[in-house]
Every structure is written in C-alpha cells, then in structure tokens.
Image (cartoon, helix red, strand yellow):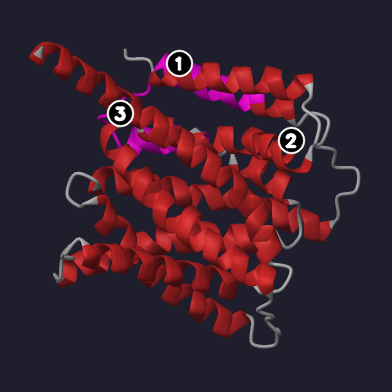
C-alpha cells in the first residue's frame, strides 16, 4: 500500500513541471496583446515601471504572509540591481518601445529568436549544459514551426523606418532576456525563486521610472480602464506569478528548454484569438504547432 501511495505521489510530481510549463505558455501568450492595449494610453517606460513596481508589491505582500525573509547583504543587493536591469529593464524596455511601431503578433515572433541566443550563450556561460545535436535540432524545429504558422503574415512590403526600428528593438530584447535566463539559472541554486524575482523587480521599476523621467516628460499618460487593466494583469499574472514559476522551473531543467516557451507563445496567442474572438484555426497553425511541440520534446528528452 505504501509503495502504491509513493508511486502515485511520484507520478503527480512528474506532472507538475508540465503543468507549470503549460501555465507559463498560456500566461505569456496573452501578455503581448495586453502590453499593446496599455500602450494605447500610457508611454512605454512609465507603463513598464508601474507594472514591475506593482508586481514587487504583490510579491512582497505574499512573502510577508509566508514570513519570508529577504537577504540584506550589500553584495547580494548589487547582484539584484544588476540582475533586475539585465533581465527586466534591458529586455522589456526594448519590447515596450518596439511595440509602439509594430504589431504584438510580429513582436512575439521576433522575440522568439531567444532560444538561439540562449543556445549560443550557454556554451560560454553554462558549460554544464553541454551543446548537443538534439538541442540544436529541437530549437531549429521549433523555429521552423513558428515560421510555418506565420508564413502568410510576415510580409515586409509596407516596411518603413519606424517599423524597422521597432523590429530591431524587439530582436535585440531577447539578448538581455537570454543573459537574464542564464544568470537566473546560475543563481537559482543560491536563491529562492521569490527572492530572485521580488527585489530585482523593485530595482527594475526604479530604472524604468528613471527612463520615463528622461525620455517621457512631454507625454500625457491616461489612466483609463484599459490602461489599469493592462497594468494589473501584467503585474500579477504576466510578472509576479509567471516569473516565480519560471525561475522555479529553471532550477530543475535546461535553460534552453525554458527559453523555448517563446516558440509556444505566438501560436498559443492565436488559439486565444480562436477561443475569445472566434478567429479561424488554419492548417498552418496545426502543422506549425506540431513542429514546435516535437522540438520541445526533443530538447526535453534525456541524453
């Protein structure tokens, strides 16, 4: 009887990572659209700063309820400042700014170069995660799946300079996120996921407010219903909850595998459109999503 109970518990625990991975895909697939909604009324750096500061408040409240104590060492806080700026400010500043000029769907596709960045950087920064043929094959297959899905939507016929700047910004953004993912993978052995997210988000919010003061002094933010919804949704679900889950997963799995979430979010965003807006599901979506899932399976499969 004991063996059966232990077996059931083990089976249950094996499903947790898959559930968390799926949850992250669902949450982050919706954030591209919600960021775009917030930018209708708010300048990008201010919107991001408020988002991360509210996420910090959510996590601080949760930590206090758990009587969780944050480290106080000066060296530790210097790391959190650096980590917050690299992982959050660098990437999200470019994403928010870029989405002023390109669609949220195109932004999510361009950001999907992140697994390639992680794959290359991990050779240098994560030698314990050895580069293997299956990782390269899985990443390539996932990206091919993404191209299949959006092959009829990636026309550049109407490209102008502002669109180009927006695209370049979003293509550079995942480089910062990749560095943050690798740094988080290293730090996850020393810090609890709540610690690794909460304090860096506070420092990131301060840096965003600084950018807003420097570059957005002449803008007129409007805190209408959609702006407030965007901030709260992104702060609670897209930031506080999602990043705690992400760094919890990062403790126990490959950085390359976790970066492949960026392959899943664009097609899942299309599924959101089908579910909420009654948009059509095309054979390209089904074919491309199958390629992405096979790519993830290849990367996840043990050596």
Closer to the chain start, of discs 1 and 3, is 3
Label annotation for residue 274: 2
Q: Are marks 2 and 1 in contact (CB under 8 Å)?
A: no
Closer to the chain start, of discs 3 and 2, is 3
Where does the magenta region start and end? Answer: 116-145
Residue at image point 50% right, 36% down: 261
Give the quarter of the image for residue 263: top right
How far apart are labels 3 and 2 at the CA level? 38 Å
Name the side, left or right, on which 83 lies relative to 173: left
- Residue 242 seen in the current view: yes
Closer to the chain start, of discs 2 and 1, is 2
How far apart are labels 2 and 1 at the CA level? 28 Å
Name the side, left or right, on which 285 lies relative to 85: right
Q: Element under label 3?
A: loop
Q: Nearer the viewer, residue 176 or 32?
A: 32
Q: What kind of secondary structure does the magenta stretch mostly adopt?
A: helix
Q: Element under label 1?
A: helix
Front tag of 1 and 3: 1
Q: Which residue is mark 1?
A: 298
Residue at image point 74% right, 68% down: 40
- Residue 117 seen in the current view: no
How far apart are labels 1 and 3 at the CA level? 15 Å
């Amino acid at each position: 009887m004991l063996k059966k109970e232990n077996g059931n518990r083990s089976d249950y625990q094996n499903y947790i990572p898959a559930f968390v991975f799926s949850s992250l895909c669902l949450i982050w697939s919706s954030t591209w659209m919600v960021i775009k909604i917030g930018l209708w009324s708010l300048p990008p750096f201010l919107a991001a700063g408020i988002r991360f500061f509210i996420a910090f408040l959510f996590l601080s409240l949760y930590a206090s309820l758990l009587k969780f104590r944050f480290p106080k060492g000066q060296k530790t806080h210097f790391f959190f400042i650096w980590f917050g700026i690299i992982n959050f400010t660098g990437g999200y500043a470019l994403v928010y700014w870029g989405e002023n000029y390109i669609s949220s769907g195109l932004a999510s596709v361009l950001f999907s170069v992140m697994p390639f960045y992680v794959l290359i950087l991990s050779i240098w920064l994560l030698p314990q995660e050895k580069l293997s043929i299956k990782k390269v094959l899985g990443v390539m297959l996932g990206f091919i799946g993404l191209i299949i899905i959006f092959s009829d939507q990636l026309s550049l016929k109407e490209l102008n300079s502002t669109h180009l700047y927006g695209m370049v910004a979003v293509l550079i953004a995942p480089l910062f996120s990749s560095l943050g993912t690798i740094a988080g993978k290293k730090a996850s052995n020393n810090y609890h996921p709540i610690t690794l997210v909460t304090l860096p988000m506070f420092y990131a919010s301060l840096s965003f407010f600084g950018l807003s003061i420097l570059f957005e002094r002449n803008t007129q933010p409007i805190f209408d219903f959609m702006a407030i919804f965007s901030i709260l949704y992104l702060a609670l679900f897209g930031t506080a909850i999602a990043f705690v889950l992400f760094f919890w997963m990062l403790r126990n799995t490959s950085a390359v595998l976790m970066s492949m979430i960026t392959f899943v979010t664009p097609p899942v965003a299309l599924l959101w459109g089908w579910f909420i807006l009654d948009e059509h599901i095309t054979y390209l979506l089904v074919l491309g999503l199958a390629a992405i899932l096979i790519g993830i399976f290849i990367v996840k499969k043990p050596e």
